Image: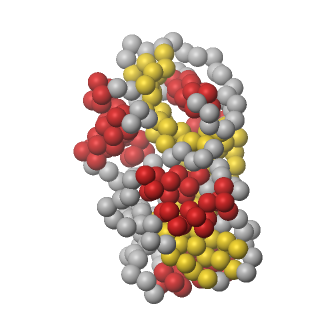
Amino acid sequence: MRVTVYPDAGPFLDRALADLERQEVANGLMLGICLGLQKAPPKTAPLLATVEDDRGLALAAVMTPPHRIVLASHLDDPSEAVDALARWLASSPWAIPGVLGPAHVADAFARRWGKPFTPGMYQRVYELREVIHPAYPPGAFRIATPDDLAIVAPWVHAFQFDIGQAATAEDSREIARQRIDEGGIYLWDHQGPVSMAAKARPTRHGVTVNLVYTPPDARRKGYASACVARLSQLLLDQGYAFCTLFTDLANPTSNHIYQDIGYVPVCDFNAYDFVG
């Protein structure tokens, strides 16, 4: 097994893009991160690495500190590649706060890394190629504008809290401001905003729907289904072949409503945080 480290996203994608796109939905998180790094290099250098054997790419790894390392592999048993990466990382200066990836890959790395770990969110990746339109509730779908920042910012903060992401209110406000300025956040509006969804991490053929949030007093009224369905249709109409999204497996409601509007499960993702 050969571990290769890349100075930036360009040469990493030169090597890994074709392999990752063979499972573009499952690898959409990694692809979206790397394509984003090409457009806007981060202040802190990322880790970008591949592990290869004589048959080709066995494992790919991307980490943008302080976030978890993200792994991808097409192998049913990635243990040899995971072992090679872990041995290389152990002799490197990189601090690994956690791991995220397809369940069997993340599980293999968490066991191999040798440090105590706590489970993060167990998620499922879904794909949609055709929207099944629900019975739409009262209201209308629209893009968020800077005038909505006072509402969207605390929703972003609440969403981050719900998924276990540590963020200050000011950090969440900056994310909301940036995403609104980019034209990436959409709302269902019924006498004011009642639900939110966003587009993120486009790949060559698909795009992710995320930041799906409805405040507690507006839930169970169909607003989230309506907002996600309209946004998904808009993205398909813009030329994307498919939309993807991640759900929390501990939340049966969200998993159910997304399937009702056409999202099909593809694979599971596990996250672990290392202790110490």
Q: Nearer the viewer, residue 63 or 162?
A: 63
Q: Quadrant of the N terminus?
A: bottom right
Q: Determine whether, in the image, residue 1 is placed left or right of residue 156.
A: right
Q: Is residue 122 visible?
A: no
| Image quadrant in which you'd find residue 66 | bottom left
Q: Residue at x 37, y 17 (%)?
A: 192
Q: Nearer the viewer, residue 100 or 62?
A: 62
Identify the residue at the far left of this view: 170
Q: Determine whether, in the image, residue 4 is placed left or right of residue 74.
A: left
Residue 63: x and y in percent read 46, 65
Q: How is the image coloured?
A: secondary structure
Vertical order, 12 against 34 (above or below): below
Residue 93: x and y in percent read 39, 81
Vertical order, 109 against 189 (above or below): below
Q: Determine whether, in the image, residue 91 is placed left or right of residue 262.
A: left
Q: How many marks?
A: 0
Vertical order, 171 against 20 (above or below): above
Q: Determine whether, in the image, residue 152 is placed left or right of residue 246.
A: left
Q: Residue at x 48, y 81 (%)?
A: 89
Residue 71: x and y in percent read 57, 65
Q: Quadrant of the C terminus?
A: bottom left
Q: Nearer the viewer, residue 60 or 226?
A: 60
Vertical order, 148 against 204 (above or below): above
Q: Nearer the viewer, residue 176 or 34?
A: 34
Residue 220: x and y in percent read 53, 25
Q: Residue at x 59, y 52 (%)?
A: 28
Q: Residue at x 73, y 81 (%)?
A: 54
Q: Is residue 59 visible?
A: yes
